[in-house]
Amino acid sequence: MGNWVVNYWFSVLFLATWLGLNVFLFVHAFLSYEKADKYFYTREILGSALAWARASARCLNFNSMLILLPVCRNLLSFLRGTCSFCRHALRKQLDHNLAFHKLVAYMICLHTAIHIIAHLFNFEHYSRSRWATDGSLASILSTLSQQERDEDSWINPIQSPNMTVEYVTFTSIAGVTGVIITIALVLIVTSAMEFIRRSYFEVFWYTHHIFIIYFIGLGIHGIGGIVRGQTEESLNESHPHRCAEFLEQWDDHDSHCKHPRFEGLPAESWKWILAPGILYIFERILRFYRSKQKVVITKVVMHPSKVLELQMSKHGFIMEVGQYIFVNCPSISYLEWHPFTLTSAPEEDFFSIHIRAVGDWTENLIRAFEQQHSPIPRIEVDGPFGTVSEDVFQYEVAVLVGAGIGVTPFASILKSIWYKFRHADHNLKTQTAGHAALNFDKATDILTGLKQKTSFGRPMWDNEFSTIANAHPKSVVGVFLCGPQTLAKSLSKRCHQYSSLDPRKVQFYFNKEDF
Ligand SMILES: Cc1cc2nc3c(=O)[nH]c(=O)nc-3n(C[C@H](O)[C@H](O)[C@H](O)COP(=O)(O)OP(=O)(O)OC[C@H]3O[C@@H](n4cnc5c(N)ncnc54)[C@H](O)[C@@H]3O)c2cc1C
């Protein structure tokens, strides 16, 4: 297992806490609905399906509360800044934001499935007990609405024999919003599959914004109060343990057991999603505000292999190494924002990006900048946002591995190291930067434009790691990769393998940036 714990102990702890909270919320809600006297009569009709529906709803709310947080880029950047003194194990969690976002989404899907199945059973039970004529408690409870017209007299939403399950589904708030939320969720999840994201990014991006409908639907889903329980006064007046057996006396005036009274369960979802919803709205407002600030393009360089370099300046723009920005070009598309890593160093008086042509948007942008006689297109910039590479100076020894256009995050770092060495920055912890760039570009080096590549071929990782481990036997080594998943696996494995079990000896920390 090597020293797996060094790299992953905090992730495991974090995930265990999240899973633990899910289990706790589920079990707690399940037992409450399975045991509480308030739902004695409801359980009589619905059985355990009531508890399954409510427990999954509780977990759905909890995970819907969490799902927006990992995609609040500004919040993450803020946290990264405020916990710059925290251990990197803690800060590293911020780089798993999208992985966590996906896990939470899977959990939402799981609980949605449980919730829907439980409610199908519930409808079936409501329907059956409404039609039953066997004189059972469930059937008598289901006819209560016929005898009394008060709002608190009924428990079964199927109130007349003509009412079908479909009718209740499409005429109740809970039913209609439930159908809408489910369709929204299916669209969001299916369009976020790896294949769609890689091949039709716009389809994924626009469909993902259906999340707005999902949240509105979820917020109002419970306000109809279709699932009902006995009111507190009614419980005090005629407790089910005392009165359930004497249902034939409920109508007697001199009986101690009156007709039970019911109320809809109060809507809960909105309470869970309100705070993250407001936070996310602030996030979008901030993104919009920053994107509207003027950007001046100071230099345009066309590198070989269709790589465009844009040097820009913007009032109040402060960057760190390894950060990225989102770029919009209104003349190409008003809505599309594309992320690009900053290749300039914080010490420079401009910020730059290198854009490689890979698809429609990047090709159109490069074409627009290549046209000599037309004015330079207007660019909007949002950011900068932090990435894992920001932590590079936290390590005594750093190994930077970039493949293809993945060398861009490291351009900024290497430049900055150069500036820091030049100005004899005594705060610089990093003593060594091993640079093993895998350059797949055939003709020239993307960043330097020189025929001479930084290095050729695949490094012998075992040799590289054992050399570093021998040279720095007591150091904390940060390994940074921006490249393909296969390489990530290989480097992550070496990091575990070459880290010492003794925390005072060499430790390799693996950090990956995704493009
Ligand atoms: C954090 C980060 C930093 C990046 N830095 C650089 C860089 O320095 N230089 C560089 O050339 N490229 C970089 N990229 C990749 C760059 O964003 C995509 O190449 C670009 O968005 C492709 O757009 P397209 O419409 O031309 O291509 P498409 O054909 O639409 O897409 C090609 C690939 O890019 C991905 N992609 C498309 N649109 C987006 C988007 N809005 N957000 C995220 N991914 C998208 C798709 O999943 C697909 O795999 C970075 C990506 C990320 C996530």
Image (cartoon, helix red, strand yellow):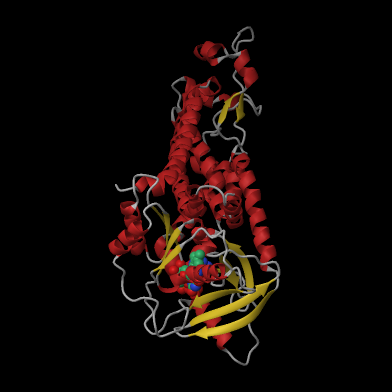
* Quadrant hosting residue 299: bottom right
Q: Residue furthest top?
A: 254
Residue 148, horizontal then vertical, whole percent = 63, 24
Residue depicted at 28% across the width and 61% down the height: 462
Compared to residue 405, the image places residue 49 above or below, namely above
Of residue 489 and residue 7, the one placed in the foreground of this image is 7
The answer, for residue 255, to whether it is visible in the render is yes
Residue depicted at 50% across the width and 43% down the height: 166
Compared to residue 18, the image places residue 337 above or below, namely below
Compared to residue 126, the image places residue 421 above or below, namely below
Residue 493, horizontal then vertical, whole percent = 32, 55
Q: Would residue 35 be found to the left or right of residue 258 on screen?
A: left
Of residue 12 and residue 416, the one placed in the foreground of this image is 416
Residue 45, horizontal then vertical, whole percent = 48, 26
Residue depicted at 56% across the width and 11% down the height: 249
Of residue 505 and residue 515, the one placed in the foreground of this image is 505
The answer, for residue 119, to whether it is visible in the render is no
Of residue 347 and residue 79, the one placed in the foreground of this image is 347
Residue depicted at 49% across the width and 61% down the height: 389
